[in-house]
Image: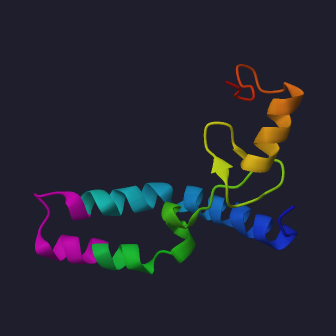
Amino acid sequence: MAKKSMLERERKREKTVKRYAKKRAGLKKIIASPTSSDGERAAAMAGLQKLPRNASPSRLRNRCAMTGRPKGFYRKFGLGRNKLREETMQGNIPGLRKASW
């Protein structure tokens, strides 16, 4: 099980990303637009830099839904490799079973 503080930090980052998503998207649109002037583009870049660091979605970390483990994460199932194996062996994941040949 991951430390409670790490899980809380991750939840806090998710909330921050959601809170600033629209503002961030608008600024990125201005920066990428070929019709915007250099002044508008510079102002948009400055505005983007003033946003909190945790407003960036790239700072989020995928974690296992059961244990909070950050490494060995399978995106398709939302679980870490250990829990995925346990749940598979118990037959709790439909269509997934241990390979044997």
Which residue is depicted at the point 10% across and 58% down?
A: 35
Is residue 34 one of those drawn in magenta?
yes
- Residue range highlighted in magenta: 31-44
Q: Please state, as top left, top right, bottom left or bottom right, where the C terminus lies in the image.
A: top right
Q: Quadrant of residue 100?
A: top right
Q: Is residue 3 visible?
A: yes
Query: Is the residue 80 above or below the residue 98 in the image?
Result: below
* x, y percent for residue 53: 52, 76
Is residue 37 one of those drawn in magenta?
yes
* x, y percent for residue 22: 45, 54
Furthest residue in direction top, as rendered? 95
Which residue is depicted at the point 59% across and 62% down?
A: 60
Q: Please state, as top left, top right, bottom left or bottom right, where the N terminus lies in the image.
A: bottom right
- With 97 as the anchor, is 19 left or right in this view? left
- With 83 as the anchor, is 35 left or right in this view? left
Which residue is depicted at the point 43% across and 80% down?
A: 50
